[in-house]
Image (spheres, rainbow, N blue to C red):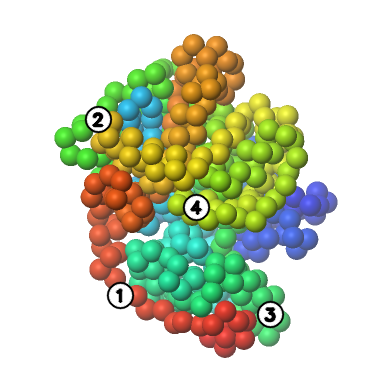
Amino acid sequence: MRYFSTRNKGQGVSFAAAALTGLAPDGGLFVPEEIPSYSGGVKNSLGNMDFCDIAFETIRPYVNPEIPDSVLEEIVHSAYPFSAPLVAVGDRLVLELFHGPTAAFKDFGARFMARAFSYLRRGEDKPLKILVATSGDTGGAVADGFYGVEGISVTVLYPRGRVSPLQERQIAGLGGNISALAVEGSFDDCQRLVKAALGDESLRKRLTLSSANSINVSRLIPQAVYYAAAAGKAFAGKTDPDGAATPRAAGNGEFAAGDFGVRAGQAVTLVVPSGNFGNLTAGLYAMKMGAPVRGFIAATNANKTVPDYLESGNYEARLSQATISNAMDVGAPSNFERMAAHFSWDEMKRIIRGVSVSDAETRETIAGVYRESGYFLDPHSAVGWKAADKLFAQGLIGKGSGVQGPWGHGPLAILSTAHPAKFAETVEPITAAVPVPPSLAKTMERKVESRTIPADVSALLEVL
Ligand SMILES: *Cc1c(COP(=O)(O)O)cnc(C)c1O
């Protein structure tokens, strides 16, 4: 597969070049020259296939022939010893994307990316240094994904005192080839330092530099896998039993989903809590490949650039506003450029409906779902839950809505992007003690080892 910049259809590059450089030289994002289709055989059996087999079939056309089948097979099995259960909660479905080591969906992208990088760089002797700026979740997933990968080291920059104790242990508790820098400043400062270092000539002479932010196409593609797996399962009329990390209070059992539950032969609508829109873009890829998806609800917090665009057709990036679902505090979503490269406004409007949710509504939803179902939602997933409620209240989804298309009546799944224990400081005061999954309990025992630096470029260059 060849990859093109969203800003220049002329020059194609290989998957390796697109993945290892991250951003196109003209500042655009890499997109595949075409979105491939599943073969009929695969499309019809998504509901019965193993998660790793779906991962293999989904990723293969994007990396073939650069990553041979036997290597891809190994990569997906080593990346995904966990999967993404589709469980019933109350009247609808929740697609739990937090069963990986850092308990957020970013594990799916980061773990594939690390293994792909390691293979694509075999035989290189100049070490690769990956620089990542994080506001919290990305740094942990990237650090964990690359931990122990030979020939690659990672430096994570995070704003000192502005990530949770758990996130800090995920970022700065591993050691080995992962180092952590606590920057005396904001996330924007961290990002500015990373950009400056990536452009520094003398540093580039010594080290091969790369970044691992969510615009990297090798993080995006593997995220299509859980959409295909969930859509296939729902279409086959199946759900999963609770997984080891499912945050359901004892005594609440598993609920049979009501109006929005699975029915064999019916395609699912997926609600995607969104910030940079990498997750939703991956969903669009899965749908285009042939996964049985009816449509998407793009759920945002107060940062509603994309819902407003879907409404008006005018795209206006803004400054970000701080909310309690802070991994989605993005006013200028970087993946929008990719969505717009593949789909016109009319096409997007036909398959995506945007909804914005306030912090007060998010809190009410966490409390309400816990009260009614004994299920803990993290603030990001709660934005998704509430977005569906708002459309239901407007008569746009659900029984009797009579509406055709992605909204209308049928199975509905909320993507749960993080485990609630990661955001216990917000969730617990309005619910009860959140059960902590084993991977996070282990992380809390780690010792933080990071170096504090002022928010200036020379300090970063000195450390590197
Ligand atoms: C990153 C993140 C999001 C937003 O995902 P995008 O792909 O940037 O839209 C939502 N929820 C959580 C918990 C995240 O970490």
Indicate the secondary structure of the residue bearing disc 2.
Answer: loop
For residue 254, the mark is 2
Q: In the current view of this chain or complex, which residue is farthest to the left? A: 251
In the image, 318 versus 244, the foreground residue is 318
Q: Earlier in the sequence, mark 2 or mark 1?
A: 2
* Residue to which mark 1 is pinned: 447
Q: Earlier in the sequence, mark 3 or mark 2?
A: 3
For residue 193, the mark is none
* Residue to which mark 3 is pinned: 200
The answer to whether residue 12 is left or right of residue 176 is right
Disc 4 vs disc 1: Cβ atoms closer than 8 Å? no
Indicate the secondary structure of the residue bearing disc 1.
Answer: loop
Between circles 2 and 4, the one closer to the viewer is: 4
Q: For label 2, count other residues whose C-alpha is less than 10 Å away and answer few (under 14), some (14-19) or many (20+).
A: some
Mark 2 and mark 1: Cα distance apart in space: 37 Å
Q: Earlier in the sequence, mark 2 or mark 4?
A: 2
Q: Which amino acid does the dot numbered 4 rest on?
A: Thr
Residue 146 visible? The answer is no
Q: Earlier in the sequence, mark 4 or mark 3?
A: 3
Q: Earlier in the sequence, mark 4 or mark 1?
A: 4
Mark 1 and mark 3: Cα distance apart in space: 32 Å
* Residue to which mark 4 is pinned: 323
